[in-house]
Image (cartoon, coloured by chain):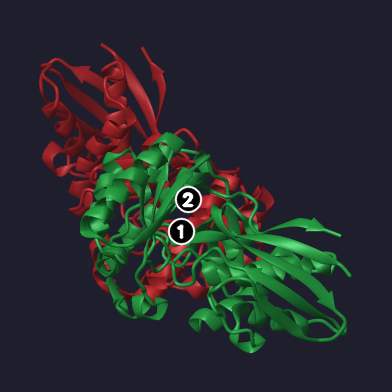
Chain colours: A red, B green
């Protein structure tokens, strides 16, 4: 019976100014899925971690995605998935997207790559819907394409992979809960046109910065006048984290997804490590528990490790 | 006495979704300026056309820009400018920007290129202020840099030149007046966040499309959900112009600057000519006077033709 092992990465959605449209994949942390084809139309989920996620397919992110795929297949097949999550649910670095996208990538490998990448994103979005109630692609797209992605349109889906230079990422995850739904609710529904213009100027600058490999432009463009000023209130010590990171040489950064994780981009590993130290000192001072990762932008997305 | 001749091009600001931040230069039409150094701190403007623009420097776009430059110079020098405008004032293709930018580029050549490009934009913006009351760079930047430019920030000024593939442009100029100030006034000061997100997704797509040389992406991204629906009401037959242009094979397009000119981008000259014919028939039917240009994106900006 064919078996595949998938490594499916954490992702950072929004990238400061690019709310709902930009995202990138990380090399660490990643979840591991071991997947087998089953000879009946079913999805069997086995949790190999301690997060106690529901195993009923229709309540589980992996299940939601795979059931959507099975609905599009005439074959009488199904999937068994052993899931080992290393990306903590609710951390704001795309834990649910990693599950959904990884499961779909693994299933596609078991089906000899019957689906194209855009279809994989579309199907994985059904999993994301279970986690957040909305079918959005801002974590799913970079998780499947790898690298930096722009979602130009959700309907019809239009995903643009962007070139980018080598980038180091420091991500700090305060051990507090920020609900995506709540983080969305506190946003203003109407925004000043002049601020929206500032925002799309920065989105344009950030896209150009990635594609040119212009680190300074990437840094200058990571400014968010609309979302960060509101959402950052939910994250302890946010302004200090940002300040000390910039002083340590970070290009810039901000809230990962809807938080509570905060990421910073750096040109090289030494700087990313200095940023790590500076962030660590902020949180030790205000006594917030945290995890911290120093990693790089992942250019592969979810990958098949071995198949037999 | 040194003399320079400057060709200074028309420009298209906004490029549909990129309101206030994107723009490109055209190869046709362009204004011609013949400039000489004077041995006293003065600006002498001689109009060689029939537009009857004011010749008092402080009321003239050329004068406003050059007086700003002279304020930054210790030298006891001035400029004489013979201006031949081919870009009709009020057409929405950067007539005032061409005057201001051309004068500054010519003056800089007479001063052996003492100023850098970003300074030239900054100084020319003083001329734009005389025309519209606001110091904005969305026409000035492409007029000086050439090609496609992104203004990431006005203060501090941050201009990003973007790579772009060969592009043909059809521009139709209905002979009606749309005041920039009025076209700005009718815009809503507050906009829905969800529309702003759609807009910056398209700005990101358009920047990526130019830089990748991806014609389809350029076309798909030229969508404006915020400005065009309002401003297009000021332009006779706008929806028909757009419809027939797309049917003729245009990639897309929209209002040039604040109008009334309407531009369409095409991949090749044959298509741009078909678009011209289609636009012409719309305006002949509704009996609106117009001028029409078929040209290409200019990659040089304002240029010195000869100096002696």
Image coords of residue A256 (percent x, y): 42, 58
In depth, the one of A287 and A151 nearer the eye is A151
Q: Which residue is mark 1?
A: A203
Q: Residues within 10 Å of mark 2 (few under 14, many from 20)?
A: many
Q: Say if residue A205 shows up in the picture.
A: yes
Quick check: marks 1 and 2 in contact, CB under 8 Å? yes
Asked whether B55 or B11 is in front, the reply is B55
Residue A301, percent from left and from top: 42, 35
At 37% from the left edge and 28% from the top edge, which residue is drawn?
A: A6
Frontmost residue, A257 versus B244 = B244
Residue A250 visible in this rendered orientation of the protein = no
Output the chain of dot 2: B
Give the structural element (helix, strand or loop) at label 2. helix
- In the image, what residue occupies the spot 50% across and 59% down? B23
Task: Note whether A53 is above or below A247 in the view shown.
Answer: above
Quarter of the figure that contains the N terminus of chain B: bottom right
Q: Secondary structure at mark 1?
A: helix
The residue carrying mark 2 is: B207
The image shows residue A92 at horizontal and vertical percentages of: 36, 55
């Amino acid at each position: 019976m064919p078996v595949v092992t998938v490594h499916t990465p954490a992702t950072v959605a929004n990238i400061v100014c690019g709310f709902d449209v930009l995202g990138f994949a990380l090399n660490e942390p990643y979840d591991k899925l071991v997947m087998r084809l089953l000879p009946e139309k079913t999805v069997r989920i086995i949790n190999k971690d301690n997060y106690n996620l529901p195993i009923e397919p229709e309540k589980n992110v992996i299940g939601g995605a795979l059931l959507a795929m099975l609905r599009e297949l005439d074959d009488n097949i199904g999937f068994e998935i052993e899931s080992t999550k290393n990306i903590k649910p609710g951390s704001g670095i795309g834990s649910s997207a990693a599950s959904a996208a990884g499961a779909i990538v693994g299933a596609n490998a078991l089906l000899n790559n019957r689906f194209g990448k855009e279809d994989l994103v579309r199907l994985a979005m059904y999993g994301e819907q279970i986690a957040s109630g909305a079918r959005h692609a801002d974590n799913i797209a970079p998780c499947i394409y790898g690298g930096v992605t722009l979602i130009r349109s959700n309907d019809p889906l239009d995903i643009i992979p962007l070139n980018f230079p080598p980038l180091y990422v420091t991500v700090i995850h305060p051990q507090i809960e920020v609900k995506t739904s709540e983080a969305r609710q506190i946003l203003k529904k109407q925004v000043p046109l002049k601020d929206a213009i500032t925002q799309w100027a920065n989105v344009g600058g950030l896209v150009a910065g990635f594609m040119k490999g212009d680190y300074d432009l990437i840094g200058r463009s990571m400014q968010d006048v609309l979302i960060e000023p509101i959402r950052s209130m939910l994250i302890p010590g946010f302004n200090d984290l940002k300040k000390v990171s910039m002083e340590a040489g970070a290009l810039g950064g901000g809230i990962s997804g809807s938080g509570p994780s905060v990421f910073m981009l750096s040109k090289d590993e030494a700087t990313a490590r200095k940023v790590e130290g500076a962030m660590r000192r902020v949180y030790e001072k205000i006594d917030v528990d945290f995890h911290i990762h120093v990693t790089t932008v992942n250019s592969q997305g979810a990958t098949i490790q071995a198949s037999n």
